[in-house]
Amino acid sequence: MGKTRDIDDLPKNPANYTSLTPLWFLERAATVHPTRISIVHESVQYTWQETYQRCRRFASALSNRSLGLGSTVAVIAPNVPALYEAHFGVPMAGAVVNCVNIRLNAQAIAFLLGHSKSEVVMVDQEFFAPVEEALKIWEGNEKNFKSPLLVVIGDKSCDPKSLEYALGRGAIEYEKFLESGDPEFDWKPPEDEWQSIALGYTSGTTSSPKGVVLSHRGAYLMSLSNPIVWGMDEGAIYLWTLPMFHCNGWCFTWTLAALCVKSICLRQVTAKAIYSAIAYAGVSHFCAAPVVLNTIINASKEETILPLPRLVHVMTAGAAPPPSVLFSMSEKGFRVTHTYGLSETYGPSTVCAWKPEWDSLPPIKQARLNARQECRAPFACDAKNGLTRSLKFCRVNMPLHGRVRDLIGRLTLQEKIGLLVNNAAAVPRLGIQGYEWWSEALHGVSNVGPGTKFGGAFPGATSFPQVITTAASFNESLWEEIGRVVSDEARAMFNGGTAGLTYWSPNVNVFRDPRWGRGQETPGEDPVVAGKYAASYVRGLQGNSRFRLKVAACCKHYTAYDLDNWNGVDRYRFNAIVSKQDLEDTYDVPFKSCVVEGKVASVMCSYNQVNGKPTCADPNLLKNTIRGEWRLNGYIVSDCDSVKVLYENQHYTATPEEAAAATIKAGLDLDCGPFLAIHTENAVKGGLLNEEDVNMALANTITVQMRLGLFDGEPSAQPFGNLGPRDVCTPAHQQLALHAAQQGIVLLQNRGRTLPLSRTNLTVAAIGPNADVTVTMIGNYAGVACGYTTPLQGISRYAKTIHQSGCIDVACNGNQQFGMAEAAASQADATVLVMGLDQSIEAEFRDRKDLLLPGYQQELISRVARASRGPTILVLMSGGPIDVSFAKNDPRIGAILWAGYPGQAGGAAIADVLFGTTNPGGKLPMTWYPQDYLAKVPMTNMGMRADPSRGYPGRTYRFYKGPVVFPFGHGRSYTTFAHSLVQAPKEVAVPFTSLYALQNTTAARNSIRVSHANCEPLVLGVHIDVKNTGDMDGAHTLLVFSSPPEGKWSTNKKLIGFEKVHLVAGSEKRVKIDIPVCKHLSVVDRFGIRRLPIGKHDLHIGDLKHSISLQANLEEIKS
């Protein structure tokens, strides 16, 4: 054994803890996860059991050579497994590790070897030559020089000649050295905390050696806390990138403390190698010196793989990197923490803006200022909170249900009740902050709910067109992409502390009555379109992960809710009488699609009653249908104050406690409003409700919060934690808002090809109360837009303009300004009238009285059209349909456009369509009825089907056969399209699920019950060729309708599929539309039972008609 030295002889810097040797972590890893992979290096990989045995062999080989307490083993090697084995194997023998930076020259290496009196020198084969030179220098500097034992580490990726040279100079090959040791070596824990330490010479010169030491006790404490600080858990994969071993050493100790994380050795530290390891090997953590950070941020495009597939945590070593480097790393998606002050984590720079005035400050002060901006603190499970971070519900590696159960088990009844409402109370003793559930994101992040605030770093958010306009695009991929962008901005605002993660959007009620003030919020009157919109937008908002939620969406308002305030009947007192047939066939369809296909995290119940029961207190609707039949994985929330309304306005219960009990027992989990917080405790104490009922409600809400990552600690360390102010109102997002508006605009009429207008030397009169509006364009449930382009501004980009409003506002209560409008039209080459409605006419709690243009608008349009020197174009802004029969029949009005409420870029989109930069391709998502239709349909009549005996005409294109102004699905283009059917089945045999189903079916009576059919294989593939036969590129919406066999079923056609296709002029594309038979060819009988009619079903595709015969497959079940 070498000369014994006292620990005080070694240089120490207690504030500089960088080398750790808590050997018990390694032993635990080998015991708990013996077969789990510990280290990967190119084609070589070891399990934790193998690593433990190799470390014990290392210690045994040293002991066999009488090396132990007082001995020093120097290691000079890049990132290879031997480094890790030395990190644990040397202390097992009681010796000290001397970690030598491979980037030092021979002179510095000689000093470090001599200063530590290294008795063993482990050296990688590539670095043997400089070490040999260093030994000669050491020998020349010391009289009593004793040559150390040389162990050379071979690597198959290196030139074999260097290994041969080292062996020829008397070195022992590393694997041979290990073979001389015992894999079951009985190492003993140190007798005191200083006995077995790691001495790290991180750099050093002959005049100023730098060494650091750490006791076992300190190592143990750091190993328990640092994985949490660093965001390392059981699923992490660590990458070696440091040129000096000791820093990697303690990072690896943390991998053990974090339940045995896999480590990957990276011998050559290049930007390409690092990015490749992240992209292809799943790396989530690595430690890096400032030089490595520079390598990453200065990498060329060819070397990078961006965006990163996940948030990547980086621990810096050595001097703190400059803030500019930290910020550059943050922008690429890395979260940076500095080793020598673990409280200083620079991850918040991933979500906060850099302030230029900080540039003149000292670097450390810059970094701290950046970290202290008003960014979101952890909602719960803060790693810095020693009281709560170790609680079971904070352990992200535990099953979700176990975490939820643990948290609920720790809450008192009073604390539980405080979590039943939208402004959920904090639970300080468990480290849980208060949370506001109510945020809105109908068509962009909105500040309608109290959960979202604009200002500071987030002055606004991208405001997309109102939903009714976007629905007119009939473009599912657009709907999903809008949802993705909205959730990006929502997450960014959450990270910045100005928004929540639960958004009560979308509104997927069917637009049943054209007077409904909130019809603008919906995807229109067709339940299939509404259902597809719901699923697409929700997928965009929530992300595609099966478990984790980006944000939590909510489909509302369930169910049969589409009356706000009409003829003295308001939504708070309305009892919607709905047949089982209409409920199954129309009202519930979008909600089922939202839950089953969109996997939405929440459903909101509505104010109204359905057939005498408040929806929020009806267990058949909530427990049985939403959660039971559709299997909602999420929570059910009331519309705001709905529980209070059913008690105070509807008088459904005698006491408030009964109302609280009825709703919770029916399946309500969260109350938007304070009612449940006030009355639930007395309901429990009075025996009306069990505490277990409250627990079940909380389990649903807390599960969603955990899926959002709210109980996973530091927000910036989680997926989407890198989003910040720079991700809101980006050019790409605003461009998408423009594209959405362009796709949603509908060309209702184009007489004699009035449009597009010429783009050369044109003067245009822009007239109307909506010609120069901003906020009107974003409709209701909007936020603060990034900026606006009004129709006037959009037109001004193409032509010289003359502007006259004609009316003060859309109410247009006078004609005093008509003369100036007529004069403007008479002077212009073309006139564009921008007319219609706004939120003063149609809105929440404001249903329309009629379908006409307000006030004197019709007179203004007609007079200006007569006065116009050139063509007159009418542009309408509205959410609902308008009876503009007068304009449709006026030969002086050349074209009519409907723009809905087109969002922040609406004016640009309108102008692009007017001047032909964009070819309109939108289709109406609702029927435009004539004014006299309203006299026949009270808003309170929920029936969808016509009843000629009562003079009731029915609702929507599916059931109404009377005259229309413009039909559902109507929309023209500047080009023409032709369809040809290529392939579609002519016969479909419907198999049964069982012999019992066959015996109990009604096949003999012309239908098969869907529940009796084996529906899974029944998907029809319809192939259609679509050709652009005109002279202009354009997008075409292919609509596929079906009608059932004649007889007892409705003969009206219904939409069963659609596809958006873009075609260059003269080109042709083949489109395939898949039609699930049971879903789309079925009908619903008067008992609410879905059936497949036997016989001939007709498909309608434009002018094409194709018949498919549905028959029962009796043979398959018999065989």
Image: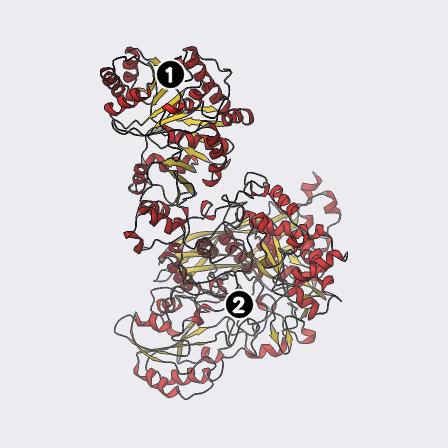
Residue 709 place in picture, x, y as percent: 52, 47
Res 4 visible: yes
Residue 200 place in picture, x, y as percent: 36, 27
Q: Residue at x 61, y 53 (%)?
A: 635
- Where 317 falls versus 1057 (above or below)? above
Residue 315 place in picture, x, y as percent: 39, 38
Q: How many marks?
A: 2
Quadrant of res 414: bottom right
Callout 1: helix, strand or loop? helix
- Where 379 falls versus 897 (above or below)? above
Residue to which mark 2 is pinned: 926
Callout 2: helix, strand or loop? loop
- Where 840 falls versus 499 (above or below)? below
Distance, label 2 to label 1, CA atoms, is 78 Å
Quadrant of res 560: bottom right
Does 490 sit left or right of 107 as displayed? right
The local crowd at label 1, few if under 14, some if 14 to 19, many if 20 or more residues have their Cα within 10 Å, is some
Q: Residue at x 65, y 73 (%)?
A: 940
Look at discs 2 and 1 and give the one toward the viewer. 1
Q: Nearer the viewer, residue 222 or 1063?
A: 222
Residue flagged by tag 2: what amino acid is it? Met
Quadrant of res 114: top left
Residue flagged by tag 1: what amino acid is it? Tyr
Q: Residue at x 53, y 42 (%)?
A: 386
Q: Nearer the viewer, residue 431 or 1090?
A: 431
Does 390 sit left or right of 44 as displayed? right
Circle nearer the N terminus (2, 1): 1
* Quarter of the picture holding the N terminus: top left
Q: Which mark is residue 174?
A: 1
